[in-house]
Amino acid sequence: MKNFHKTSLVIILSLVVIVAGTFLGIVNPLSSKFFSIYQKNLNYSSHISAINEKLDYLSDMKENQDEISTANQKFSEFVPKTHQVEDVLVQLDALARASTNNLPSFSAEEEKEAEGEFKTTTISINLVGTYETIRSFINSLENLQRFAVIESLCISGSENMASAKITLTIYHHG
């Protein structure tokens, strides 16, 4: 019976060695393949994250471009491509009449080159009214449908009447 135990023990140990060898022969390559696949998955995940960050950046850039395009379009409305000083004078006349109920006098200077791609025209405005009506006219210049800068403003007068001389510069594309 002792030999049977020895034989059984040898058979069992042989089976364990065979099974272990087979397991290691199968599992070790499988674990290497699994680890390789896991590493590739991590690598792909980092690539996907980088691509998503770039897509987010491009999306933000597109939004910024749309905002800039909208701003340029609005700016172009206020800085037209043509001179059209007559249109500005008509607008100024309407604003002055609405504010002061008086007929203003205008004079426009020759257009000049400004910085970059713009040209300017300087308009002198003389108007008479009360301080309140002149202030109302100056405030109404915000409604002018052109980009304009008040270069100078001189108001003088008495208690009831005032006169104002306003120098206004308008811009347009050259």
Image (cartoon, rainbow, N blue to C red):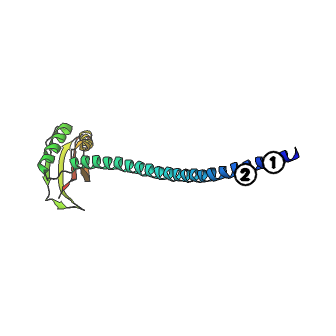
Give the side of residue 38 with respect to residue 109, left or right: right
Residue most extreme to the right = 2
| Local SS, label 2 | helix
The numbered mark at residue 17 is: 2
Q: Are marks 1 and 2 in contact (CB under 8 Å)?
A: no
Residue at left offset 16%, top offset 43%: 91
Whether residue 106 is visible here, answered yes or no, is yes
Callout 2 environment at 10 Å: few (<14), some (14 to 19), or many (20+)?
A: few
Q: Position of residue 163 (x, y in %)?
A: 21, 46
Quick check: can you spot residue 164? no
The C terminus lies in which quarter of the figure?
Answer: bottom left
Does label 1 or label 2 sit earlier along the sequence? 1
- Distance CA(mark 1)–CA(mark 2): 15 Å
Residue at the image position 18 percent from the left and 46 percent from the top: 127
From the viewer's side, name the closer residue of 44 and 159: 44
- The quarter holding residue 119 reads bottom left
Q: Position of residue 3 (x, y in %)?
A: 85, 47
**Residue 7 got which mark?**
1
Q: Label 1, secondary structure: give it.
A: helix
Q: Nearer the viewer, residue 135 or 64?
A: 64
Q: What count of labels does the image hold?
A: 2
Residue 94 falls in image quadrant: top left
Residue beneath the point at 28% across and 46% down: 70
Name the mark on residue 46: none
Position of residue 40 in the picture relative to residue 135 (left or right):
right
Give the residue type that dot 1 points to: Thr
Report crowding for label 1: few under 14, some 14 to 19, many 20 or more residues within 10 A (C-alpha). Answer: few
Query: Image point 76% across, 48% down: which residue?
Result: 11
User: What's the amino acid at mark 2?
Assistant: Val
